[in-house]
Image (cartoon, rainbow, N blue to C red):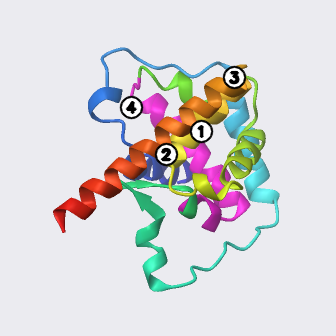
Amino acid sequence: MKTAIALLLFSTVTPFGGAHAQSKTFTPPPQNKSAIDAAIKRMETAPEKPAAAPKAPSDETRQFTAGVRNGRFWTSLGRNEKLYYLVGLNEGASVASVADGAPYFPGGASFGETEDGIDQFYAEPANARISVLDALRVFTMKVKGATPARLEAELATLRRRIAAEDEREKAKK
């Protein structure tokens, strides 16, 4: 059941079509199975932190940028929900045979550490509209030793992409 929920999450929130889908098979590192099992065990036994209640009905639509869930969505989740979400993304990438899934999950970082890294990413208000998948990718770059200049350049690119999307939406109206 938990795997089904995790896979459902992945299938509804990630932009792995198009440029991301390739014919190669992504195989998660061998430690992922035990890490996933450990994360699920922690989720089952950890006290649930209540998720933040949406402030207004329009907040739900603000949890998407270009059709993909963003930092507003992430910060509305409780700890267990975030862990399930990460497990779903990880397993979904594996099941979907995403060839470039590796850039999204840092080797050696636990799901809890990954969650903390994404929380820190979204602590910066300018990052709220960046997709969760991009936040995960930037965290992975950081764990793999990307320089501060490279990380800042990536953030600037992501923010410009969002600004350009805003301009396209305004032009449609």
The reply to whether dot 4 and dot 2 touch (C-beta < 8 Å) is no
Q: Is residue 112 left or right of residue 125?
A: right
In this view, the mark in front (1 or 4):
1
Q: Secondary structure at mark 2?
A: helix
In this view, the mark in front (1 or 2):
2
In this view, the mark in front (4 or 3):
3
Q: Is residue 126 left or right of residue 20?
A: right
Tell me how far mark 1 sits from mark 2, CA to CA: 15 Å
Q: Secondary structure at mark 3?
A: loop
Check disc 1 and report the residue beneath it: 136
Q: In front here: 64 or 125?
A: 125
Tell me how far mark 3 sits from mark 2, CA to CA: 26 Å
Marks 3 and 1, the one that precedes in the sequence:
3
Mark number displayed over residue 9: none
Check disc 2 and report the residue beneath it: 159
The type of residue carrying mark 1 is Leu
Mark number displayed over residue 96: 4
Q: In front here: 108 or 44?
A: 108
Q: Secondary structure at mark 4?
A: loop
In this view, the mark in front (4 or 2):
2
The spot of residue 46 in percent (x, y) is 82, 60
Tell me how far mark 3 sits from mark 1, CA to CA: 12 Å
Q: Which range is magenta? A: 73-98
Residue drawn at x 65%, y 19% as measured from the top left: 30
Residue drawn at x 57%, y 79% as measured from the top left: 54
Marks 4 and 3, the one that precedes in the sequence:
4
- Please tell me how crowded label 2 is: few (under 14), some (14-19), or many (20+) other residues with Cα within 10 Å: some
Check disc 3 and report the residue beneath it: 107
Q: Is residue 39 left or right of residue 150?
A: right
Q: Up-down: is 68 above or below 87?
A: below
The reply to whether dot 1 and dot 4 touch (C-beta < 8 Å) is no
The type of residue carrying mark 2 is Arg
